[in-house]
Image: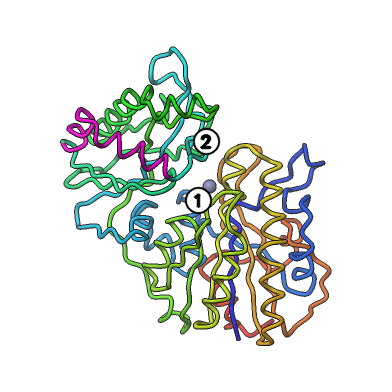
Amino acid sequence: MKYILVIGDGMADNPVPELGGVTPLEYANTPGLDTLASAGTLGSVKNCPDGLPAGSDTAILSIFGCDPRECYTGRAPLEAAATGIKLQPGDIAYRCNMVTIEDADKPWGEKKILSHSAGSIEGEVSEAIVTALFNDPVFSAAAKNAGLHVYPSRSFRHIAVQRGAVGGGQKLSPPHDHLGEPIGPILPTGGANAETLYALMKLAHETLDHHPLNEKLRAAGKMPANGIWFWAEGTAVRLPSFTEAYGKTGGVISAVPLCHGIAALVGLERITVPGATGELDTNYEGKVQAALEVLKKHPFAAIHVEAPDECTHNGDTPGKLEAITRLDSRVVAPLVAALREGGEPFRILILSDHKTLTSTRGHDGTPVPFLLYDSRRDHKTGYKHRESDGDKGEFIGEGTRLMSLLFGEFGND
Ligand SMILES: [Zn+2]
């Protein structure tokens, strides 16, 4: 028996007026998903507990069976684990995004944040810009004073670790939830350390705004990476072992450090696929191949696709539809075809971690539909993988129950 988890990040949504009042999942052409939904079981699940931020961090922790109310300290420590950064007691890890701040002759706090990803900046350029920033003599002295060290990544998602800071009470805002807004109200607040982070973000903008690498991006018609954004802070974290909890070994295929970090912390293999970008142009075929390779060695494989979430944050509704269509035609359909050909029975769970709303371009923690298919059964429900059909099925109030459902531990399906 093989078990597969597919997470389409931020696929679920609310009805969109421009799509005739249906959701992107319902609007997109997804014959592969619909075939599975029609023969499988559909329900809805709440992955983001109330009172915690609605995001992939809390949601994917839940999906992997880790109760975020017990083990969530913030997103950045999970991502830090992906790159093998070992946090010490007293360290605070932050996500350090490359962002785009409005080109305008306005005071700093009145400028708007235009992109949380510097326009989905290319990995190598992002790495070069953050490295240039932390090598700038003035900025590097300020960072050193703050005990702050950066770990550049080949995407807009860098990690920063601050040693010996007292961060209690500070409020940092996720940039993707405030696109198009003036930054003043969402800059760090709440105590001396927040002031330190604020000052570093301001200095970063001054240092980077007219940096030659950014002028080159502007000249090419691209968004400049003229700011950094600290958020997602947290302290060292431990997660329960997946294999001890479910008796299964496996691997996680993703382009984003969050998923790899959770995988590392729960004891699953982390698999990086060349050309997997976390964007619409990702290497879908490579991800499917990687999952099939994992399943030769292990009973469990997870594939995470980030693109639907990124497209929604970017306000790109056609992109979101395309991302869902590609997840269907280039991940789910070939994966299921290969598994059927392999002949061994399998169970596959497909869901969004959280909703990402076209209306706000931000996350939403209300329940998402899930689809569970078992190759040995045909429930002939006629359902499709969409929110309205998910609402007709079983409601699971705690996402932490999902893996037991996938592994068939309830025996009721
Ligand atoms: Zn998101």
Image quarter in which the N terminus is found? bottom right
Q: Nearer the viewer, mark 2 or mark 1?
A: 2
For the point 56% across and 51% down, the residue is: 365
Predominant SS of the magenta segment: helix
110 drawn magenta: no
| Disc sitting over residue 55 in the figure | 1
| Disc sitting over residue 119 in the figure | 2
Instruction: Locate residue 88 relative to residue 259 in the image: left or right.
Output: left
Q: CA distance from mark 2 to mark 1?
A: 20 Å
Name the amino acid type tagged 2: Gly
Q: Note whether 230 is above or below 182 in the view shown.
A: below
For the point 20% across and 43% down, the residue is: 166
Q: Secondary structure at mark 2?
A: loop
Quarter of the figure with residue 95:
top left
Instruction: Locate residue 132 relative to residue 280 in the image: left or right.
Output: left
Name the amino acid type tagged 1: Gly
Instruction: Locate residue 186 relative to residue 31 in the image: left or right.
Output: left
Please state the horizontal and vertical placement of residue 37, each as a whole percent of the image: 75, 68
Q: Is mark 1 within 8 Å of ligand 1?
A: yes
Crowding at label 1, few (<14), some or many (≥20) Cα neighbours within 10 Å?
many
Q: Earlier in the sequence, mark 2 or mark 1?
A: 1
In this picture, which residue range is highlighted in magenta?
A: 124-144
For the point 25% across and 43% down, the residue is: 167
Q: Is mark 2 within 8 Å of ligand 1?
A: no
| Disc sitting over residue 390 in the figure | none
Q: Residue reaching furthest top?
A: 105
Please state the horizontal and vertical placement of residue 138, each as a whole percent of the image: 20, 27
